[in-house]
Structure formats: structure tokens, C-alpha cells
Amino acid sequence: MRFAVVMILTLALSGAAQAQVSDATRAANAEMSRTLPWSDREDEEFAARGFIAAWDQPQIRSADGSRLVWDFAAYSFLQGEAPATVNPSLWRQAGLLARAGLFRVTDRVYQVRGFDVSNMTIIVGETGLILVDPLTSSETAQAALALARRTLGDRPVRAVIYTHSHVDHFGGVRGVVSAEDIAAGSVEIIAPEGFMEHAVTENVIAGNAMGRRALYQFGSGLTPGPEGQMSSGIGLAISAGTFTLIPPTRSITHTGETLTIDGVRIEFQLTPETEAPAEMNFFLPDLGVLCLAENANASMHNVLTPRGALVRDAKAWADYLTQALRLYGDRSQALVTSHAWPRFGNDRVRDFIASHRDAYKYLHDQTVRLMNAGYTDREIAEQVRLPEPLASRWFNRGYYGTMMHNSRAVYQRYMGWYDANPANLNPLPPAEEATRFVRAMGGPERVLAEGQRAFDEGDYRWAARVLNHLVFAAPDNTAARQLLARTHRQMAYQAESAIWRNMYLVAARELEQGPPDRPSQVQSADLVAATPTSYILDLLAVRLNPERLGARRFAFNLVFPERNERFAVSIANGVLVHERDVTLADAPTITSQRAVFLQAMATQTMLRAALSGSIRIAGDRRSLEGLGDVFDTPDPNFAIVTP
């Protein structure tokens, strides 16, 4: 009975949402459909090829069963023609990504796909298995390996390869190997040079802001469905399990380096500063299989991810694909990547690499050409479009990254945010500008009327800009918020990019319901343990609130005996400065296990810890009074679409 009620409600809501699709959105999606290369069925064939078996449970849950980690039925709606609420190109892409299970690539290379946002690739060695990119969480990785072993036998894991330093490619490692395996020397973990530095630090300094923005990018909290989340463009979603990390035992330091692991020869190509700061491709010469990590995908990737990161190098990205084509193209019979499905046949592999390379090269070169002609980033974004031979390839379309967003990223890498027009040199903050904008247009009623006019005409980009000003000038204007939410939904329904769709839909939800009420994120114990103390002190430095500090000054020595570390820390003039292996004379010394100190700082329980003896303070304790009060605890739910 409950199931029937849920189904009725779901259908009712679906019908209501369908009824809200505007004529402009229907027309835009119909026009998009007419331009798509439907006759190219290569992806459909490659995504299905080699299927062996699916997971025999509808869900993957945490070990105690209390938490849902992955739901295989969440995307079962992806059948038939695209509904009016979904861009037809994105509908097709999501349907291909939803094919989950164990797939055979060659006799000795397999993939588990659809268990996470990323793939786990499995290479069969002489005595065991080599696992490539063990997903995001230990629960999904454990299930993926269990599924593979049903076909391959209960073979031990001999090595794990991390292709790059993003968590969806290493976070599940403790689901497939243990620290004891590593300590015993029975398992190697191989990664590109610089992996640990970037794996643990990329999101530390700006982690709170990146985490908040990632909710928009990946559509966190949206229900998958025709009116909701429609994948991330290169994978379905990020699993909700336990993130883990075991440091590499071996680093690959140069292109051309070779290893033989459990009888499998591997040639490596380093590709730093491409999709990740530390990344590598590799080739299996005896099997004719090339792995291009995340440097090639079933979509244009992000040169600057919307969640925030350093701008990537589109030129280097293209150049490394050129190098891969030269080094391995003629020898490759199959190609696997860290997301989506493989490519089969030498001609198809070479064609894919060359076309994907040309897309990034075109993006870079034409952006720079227009930049040198005096165009700004926004003007360039309106002009740079791939030529038909590249745009007609499904894998060059913008399901994840887009030409518009990426061209602005290339501009930013070279020129920064300033477009050289002095009117944009010192603009007003958004809320102040919005107030003046609304006043200049004749008041809130006229702005709302202009927003409604633009909405009714299907001019959603302008409607969003106008209404956004009104919301920032008058955040309590319910009519403005509701109309802006409706505008964002129409833009979401038209978006070919899965993450653009996610961002529009999350924005609409927050305009209607307000920001989420999430607790501060609990960091992975493995990631915290692997983070160098200097980076943790840098994090404290960017949380220092100068208004709370005022004219006060603090100075102390910090000793972590179990790590054989000593730091001198001084706080004055609104900045925190630390130096390793330096001692400040006449300053108190705090001695503690690092984990205990971090917990005390995070919970502002330093005094309690000192009184209990878990933290020892030698010297003038009174000089440290109020130390914990000068640091901010960032709000994980700060407003984005409202002031």
C-alpha cells in the first residue's frame, strides 16, 4: 500500500513538473534534438560490449546497514524517449552511464562501472589482480571487487594504481586492501609523483567554499529523475560511503618509466597539471590496452571546475594527448578511462584520442586568438564553438565541462579576472549594485515585471540576471525568488551539461527553501592523518579572524612528539606565521598528540584538554588565554543565490 501511495505521489509530482515546462524549453530541446548525430551509435555499442554480470543487490549499504551508500535503482527511470524536462542529449548520456556491472575489455582487463561516479579497472596478473582507481568509498570498492571475483576467482590483490589525485580515484582503497597488506609487502600502491601532496591538500585551504559549491555541481540532495539530478555527465553520482587513503609505496617520476607487476608489463606517461595536478596515463604493451585516466572522457571535461580549483592547462592537456597518441596509438587495441566506457579497435582508439585532443587544442588556441584581438572572457564565451567535425562527436559534447565555461577558464589562466575595462576595475559588491540597479529601473515592481516579461518570452538568461538583482536588493521579495527559481528550472531543463543542470536546480531549491542545514563535514581520518602539519597550520591561518584578534598577540611552540615535529607559531597583526624546527624563547610550549590538539582546537576545548593532561603546556599559560576564540568556524551552508 505504501509503495502504491509513493508511486501515485511520484506520478502526480512528475505530471505537475511536466506541466511547468515552458513552450520555449520544449522548442529549445526539440531544436537540440534535430542537431544531434543520432546515427552515430558507437557509444551505445561500446557501453554495452563485454557485459558479464550486475550486482545482485539493489543497494550498497554501510557495514552496519545504517547508511545508504549506493542505489542501483535510482536511475532506472532512464528508459524511452527524453521527457520535456531533460535535454535529449543529456538523457542519452545518462542512460549510457547508468549501465552498471562487470564488463570484459580484453581477456585480462575488466571494468566495474556504474558503482560510483568513477570506474574500477581490473588487470589479471599471473597470480592475482591489479586494481586501477578503487572508486570513491570503501563500500562501493569492496562490492566492485566482490563482483569481479565471482568471474575471475578469489585472486589476491597484488597492486593498486592511483591514476591521479582526486578522491573518486583512491577513496575506496581500504575496501580492497588493508594497511597490513601494505606493511607486509604483499601489495604495492603506485601513483604519479606528487600524488600525496595534491591528494591531501587540494581542498584544504579553500575546502569549505569548495565543498559548498560542490553541492551545486553534483546536485547533492536532488533526487535523480526527470525533474531532478541527471548524473554528473561523466558518471552517475558520488557514492556516500567512507573515504579512505593509503599512501603510495611507489611513485612514477617520468614518462617512459616501466614496471612489471605480477607478470604484467606497464609503461607510464606522466601528465601533470592536466585534469589533476598529479596524473598519469599507462599502457599495457602485452595486452594492447591504453589507460588515459581522466585525460580523455565521454565528454568535454572542465578546465576550471565550477566547485573551484586552480585553472588547468588546456594546452598541456592537448599536448599530452598528442604525446599519448605518438607513444601508444599504433599499439593500442583498446582504451579504458577512469569514467564511462572503453573504446575498441585501433582505428577507433586513435580517432578518439586525436579528436578529443583537437577539441582541447581548439578551445585553447581560439580563446587565446580572440583574447589577443581584444575580446573579453564573456565575449569569447559567446563565440568559441567547436567546428562541426569536432562538435558532431558525442564525446566532445559538454555533458560535464562546456566550451562556454572552459573558454572563460583559459582567459582566466592567462589574463585573470580583470578585463581591462576600468568600469570593471572597482565594481560595487553584488548587494549594493543590485540596490542601485533596482532603483534605476524604477523600483521592485518594474524589475519584477521585466523579469516576468523575459520569462514569458523564454529569454531566461536575461530573466535570471534581472531577477537576481532584485533578490539581492530585496531578499525577502517572495515573488522575485519564486520567479527566479522557475527561471533556473527552465534553464536546467534545457542544459546539456549535467552539472549546469544540477547547479540550476540546486539554486532553484535554495531560492524556495533556503540553504541546507548540514553539519560541518567530518573529514576522512586517513586524509587528516596524511595531511602535513604545515598545511593544517596554513588552514588555521586562513581561519584567523582579525576583528576577534584585535591588538592581542600570541606566541607559542607546538610539539607533536609522535611525529617528531616542532613548530614556532606567532599570531599578530591579523596573521598567523609558523616555522618548522624553530623554537621561540620565553614562549609557552604546547606538547600533545597531533590528533588531540586538532580536536581541541576544532571544539574549542583546549583548556579542558590541558586540565585533563592530554595536552601539556609548559610556560606561561595565561598568555594563551583566548587563543581558541580568534578563529572562525566556517559555515558549511553559506548563502549563494541570496545575499
Image: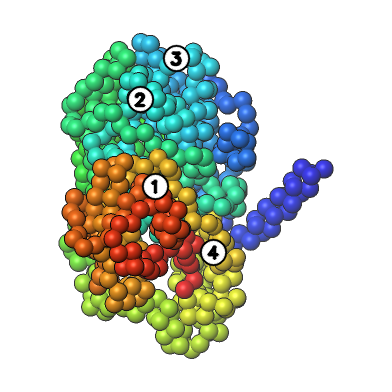
Q: Nearer the viewer, mark 1 or mark 2?
A: 1
**Which callout, 3 or 4, points at the residue further toward the start of the chain?**
3
The residue that mark 1 highlights is 595
Locate residue 474 relative to residue 387 in the image: left or right: right
Q: If you read the primary sequence from the N terminus, does the residue marked by circle 2 or circle 4 appear first?
A: 2
Q: Helix, strand or loop at disc 2? A: helix
Query: In the structure shown, which secondary structural element does the residue marked by tag 4 occupy?
Result: loop
Please give the label number shown on residue 586: none
Q: Which residue is mark 2?
A: 182
Q: Nearer the viewer, mark 2 or mark 4?
A: 2
The span from disc 1 to disc 3 (Cα, nearest Å) is 37 Å
Q: Amino acid at mark 3?
A: Arg
In the rendered structure, are the residues bearing label 3 and label 4 in contact, judged by CB atoms less than 8 Å apart?
no
> Circle 3 is placed at which residue position?
155
**Residue 23 sits in quarter:** bottom right
Where is residue 239? Give x, y as percent.
51, 40
Using a 10 Å C-alpha cutoff, classify the residue at mark 3 as few (fewer than 14 neighbours), some (14 to 19) or many (20 or more).
some
Q: Quadrant of residue 189?
A: top left
Task: Of the two numbered discs 3 and 2 on the same chain, state the one appearing first in sequence.
Answer: 3
- Find numbered disc 1 in the image and state the secondary structure of the residue it sits on: helix
